Amino acid sequence: MADAIREIHRPAALESFEQARKRLAFEELLTLQTFLIVKRRAIEKREKRRQYQFDGERIVEFRKTIPYEPTNAQKRAVKEIRETLAKPYPMNLLLQGDVGSGKTLVAAISCLYAADSGLQSAFMAPTEILAQQHYLNLEKLMAPLGVKILLLTSDMRSKTKRETLEALEKGKVDVAVGTHALLEEAVKFKNLGFLVIDERHKFGVLQRAALESKGKWPDCLMMTATPFPRALVLTEYGDTDLSILDEFPKGRKGIKTFWRNDSKRDEVYQFAKERILKGEQVFWVLPVVEESKTFLKSAIQMYQHFQKEIFHGFKVGLLHGKMKKDEKEAVMDAFKKKEIQILVSTTVVEVGIDVPNATLMVIEHAERFGLAQLHQLRGRVGRGSEQSYCFLLTSPVISGEAIQRMKIMVSTLDGFKLSEFDLKMRGPGEIFGLAQSGRREGGIVDLKRDVDVVDEARRVALEILDRDPKLTSFQNQSLKYSLDSKYRNLLDLAQIS
């Protein structure tokens, strides 16, 4: 270890520097993997003392009425969830599936297992639009079976909110769908046993802890449409079971993606008009709401320009985050009903919007967005049987990194390939802790190059903890010290999913 520290500060050669860096990265990852395994084993010592009914009347009926044949990946994920729920300790499972892979159906089946077992479920989403979308989808799938579903948001009218909270506490609600409003102290459940947390990485550790505290060791299904690279999964989610949806429902066509700079704008306008005249709909996304000191086009500016000039005579709508909730809902409802042909929007449409008739996504100033966000936005189309398209419109002069992003977006629809590329370009962010974004502070691990080191560190950590679970032996004292010094402030959080 001392040799590695000395060599990394004063390397004799580039090769010896890399060897020293790998050695120090291994030590850092060994401590992290030890922590994750200790956390996982702490979870497995809990006794949830509940049993699930997997073949109740409602789930049997649901299987008969599912509107389409589930993919093999969905069937596999449901099987894995059943097996995990049957264990004596609480489930802590991450469902990772690309945009449009069918995570909501898997979540609905899981909530039905809970309802058939006399348990309440909480379904938390990061935005009101996404929560509303989940609520409508679950209502459509589960309400005909007699499952009571309610939506809880922070700006509900006081009388409605009071009635909702009372119904929850009395056990009259099977599934409560909501945003951060579910975390409020006034929200109480009679028998909360199952959690669904969508876009898990958008919630802090303490927020997830607050939701879990409303039940007795509730089982937790976390979902993400962000395909994390394998190395990041082994670090950030090393204490979590992982289930992957790597198929798409039958009949869906791949989205054709094109990159154009501003000089080709008229071609994109013409293409959008052709789609609308065929009865299809268009998303047109911009990075800012209003005009600012920057050169960026704004949603309001573009909306007015479209109404008066480019798309005069067509039905143009506007959606952005500064609008009131009822205004946003009215616009989205009109778009779904095809009363709006082209929707000018900010990134509030990034997640949770499902309009199968929308076949064209145009993203202005695409160079301003990261790969994950571009991929999410593109995923708003391609949800019906018609061919869908995505145009990435950029400024005439953009950075070399932005050019690379545009090229990879055009070349693949595979979210996992995009995430691996993103990791190489941007780094992993903070691997573990209370922060949810940003580059890792300190540390020498480079997940772009250290996948093999992650694997080796996890293997060694397992071997050490199998021999010496409490790290009491002399040879493990330095590991124990490192574990305590790095994660002392997180030890209480080791009980959190």
Image (cartoon, rainbow, N blue to C red):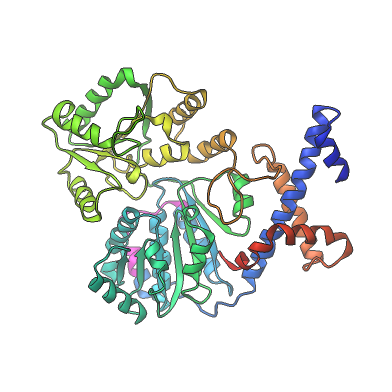
Q: Does the image show residue 185?
A: yes
Q: Position of residue 272 (x, y in %)?
A: 23, 29
Q: In the depicted view, which residue is nearer to us: 144 or 32?
A: 32
- Residue ranking furthest to the top: 263
Residue 92 lies in quadrant: bottom right
Q: In the depicted view, which residue is nearer to us: 185 or 115?
A: 185
In-image side of 439 versus 75 (left or right): right
Residue 64 in magenta stretch:
yes
Question: What segment carries the magenta color?
Answer: 61-73
- What residue do we see at 60% from left, 55% from top? 433
Q: Position of residue 462 (x, y in %)?
A: 75, 59
- Residue ranking furthest to the front: 293
Q: Position of residue 465 (x, y in %)?
A: 77, 63
- What residue do we see at 48% from left, 68% from top? 210
Quarter of the C terminus within the rendering: bottom right
Residue 184 in magenta stretch:
no
- What residue do we see at 63% from left, 55% from top? 238
Tell me: residue 397, above or below residue 106.
above
Q: Does the image show residue 283?
A: no
Q: Position of residue 314 (x, y in %)?
A: 13, 33
Q: In the depicted view, which residue is nearer to us: 327 or 55?
A: 327
